[in-house]
Amino acid sequence: MLNLITNKEKIWVLIMVSISILPVACTNKGSNIPSYSLEKQKQVTKRKMPEYVPPKPPAVYIYQGADYRDPFVPTGSTFISNSTGTFSDDFMDKEKMTTLKLRGIIRGTISGDAALITDTLGGAYILTKGKLYNRKSLVLKGVSGVIGSNSVTISGGGTTIELKLKKTMGE
């Protein structure tokens, strides 16, 4: 009788028998494999999240080089002293006014126009709103100035000088 069944039918019967045995072989009864039901999932306790500890803020950098020489001012200048024999950029006398050079004019800042001025000793000054400030941002008393289109007029101590911008190659 097996000879009457074709090979296709034999394969088909073998597949059907395998499929019918599969659910019986895969049950968990009597096995060591744990099974999880919805009740067991509810019993699982949730772990607490650790408390958030914010990171430390970065250290604040404080610039301490305000009293050093300005690296953009050329060196090799001559020394001029005041009447006490020491150099200070807290005052402006006639001798010192003759050593000033206009380096640039900045237009349209929030506080108005500003002029960058240096002297031969390496001192740097800013003229804005008619006042002359030294590198320590202190106002030089008794000195005032006016910013023009390509020049600056500074007066103080009975002396008035006009500083002009040098022409650049493009002009």
Image (cartoon, rainbow, N blue to C red):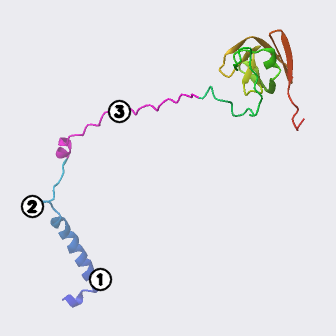
Name the residue beneath numbered marker 2. Answer: 30
Disc 2 residue type (three-letter): Gly
Crowd rating for badge 2 (residues with CA inside 10 Å; few <14, some 14–19, many 20+):
few
Q: Hey, which quadrant is residue 1 in on the image? A: bottom left
Disc 1 residue type (three-letter): Lys
Where is residue 164 shown, x and y percent of the image? 87, 24
Q: Main secondary structure of the magenta part?
A: loop
Residue at (60% x, 29% y) in the render:
65
53 or 42, nearer to the observer: 53
If you read the primary sequence from the N terminus, does the residue marked by circle 2 or circle 1 appear first? 1
Mark 2 and mark 1: Cα distance apart in space: 37 Å
- Asked if the residues shown at circle 3 and circle 2 are in contact, with their CB atoms under 8 angstroms apart, the answer is no
Secondary structure under badge 3?
loop
If you read the primary sequence from the N terminus, does the residue marked by circle 1 or circle 3 appear first? 1
Secondary structure under badge 1?
helix
Name the residue beneath numbered marker 3. Answer: 53
Residue furthest front in the image: 85
Number of on-image labels: 3
The answer to whether any part of residue 129 appears in the image is no
Residue furthest right in the image: 171
Where is residue 153 shown, x and y percent of the image? 84, 17
